[in-house]
Image (cartoon, rainbow, N blue to C red):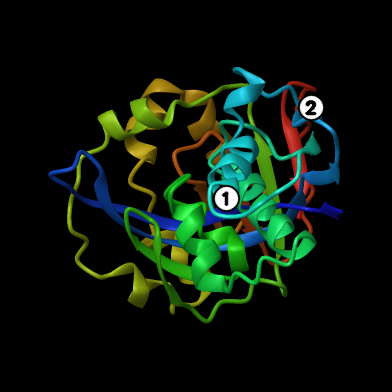
Amino acid sequence: MILFPNAKINIGLHILNRRCDGYHDLETVFYPIPLHDALEAVEATTLNFESSGIVIPGIAGDNLCLKAYKMIKKDFDLPALSIHLHKKIPIGAGLGGGSSDAAYFIRLLNEKFRLKLDTAAMQDYARKLGADCAFFIESKPVFAYGKGEEFKDVSLDLSAYSLVLIMPPVFVSTADAFRGVKPRIPETPLQELIKLPVEQWKEHIRNDFEESVFRTYPIIQGLKNSLYDAGALYVSMSGSGAAVYGVFADKPELPLFDESYHVFYV
């Protein structure tokens, strides 16, 4: 069985406060985009994981897909699987690629082995793997809050616009990004701001990570400025970075980027 995990972007990201458990309360809008990995699993004599495409750093045994398999195997009699992940979603980009792979693997197990898990049950499993992981079980636009694992439906459709996503040649540590951010309560909740026309987002919707990340990685701020210079209606870093996206009324003519940048029209 093959599934195609998709990426997401964050539209607005407010870090509200630091919790007593060490996490942060936040609010953001998760919006799915058609940039995909490919995930395949077939029955095998022994459990095996391999990947292709973008090189995944770290130890293969720590991959979230394997963690999802072992977690669910505690509750269900699953056979050994040979798992192959073809990686296209950039890593360390703020696009949720690893979380999406894990969530889609839960979906794959549920469908392939008829586990009869409903959406809520799959989301409960996914939350154990990462704060944004549960989003990808349904992968539809949502207002996310708490640690980013609680959702409310949001009415948002950007299909009439052209979206450009650019990954610069830098890696932003999520832990470092959180250490650099200053929690604050916004004057207007993001749930209200997201209702504004896209043309007004530039003046009202912010990503709280940008201030500190831009200081450390000015290349990312330069990329944001370049997209506005190209005519974008709204530009933002996604999550804690390093990817930046621009929302355009029409497909833009972008400046040339060298091969160390990855540009996606989504």
Frontmost residue, 233 versus 45: 45
Q: In terms of image quadrants, where is residue 67?
A: top right
Residue 265 percent coordinates (x, y):
78, 51
Residue at the top extreme, as displayed: 58
Residue 97 vertical position relative to residue 117 in the rendered view, above or below: above
Residue located at (56% from left, 31% from top)? 92
Frontmost residue, 264 versus 15: 15
Residue located at (61% from left, 18% from top)? 59
Frontmost residue, 91 versus 158: 91
Separation (CA) of disc 2 from disc 1: 20 Å
Q: Nearer the viewer, mark 2 or mark 1?
A: 1
Name the residue beneath numbered marker 2. 50
Residue located at (79% from left, 27% from top)? 50
In the picture, which quadrant includes the C terminus? bottom right
Residue 88 vertical position relative to residue 161 in the rendered view, above or below: above
Identify residue type, mark 2: Glu
Mark 2 or 1 closer to N-term?
A: 2
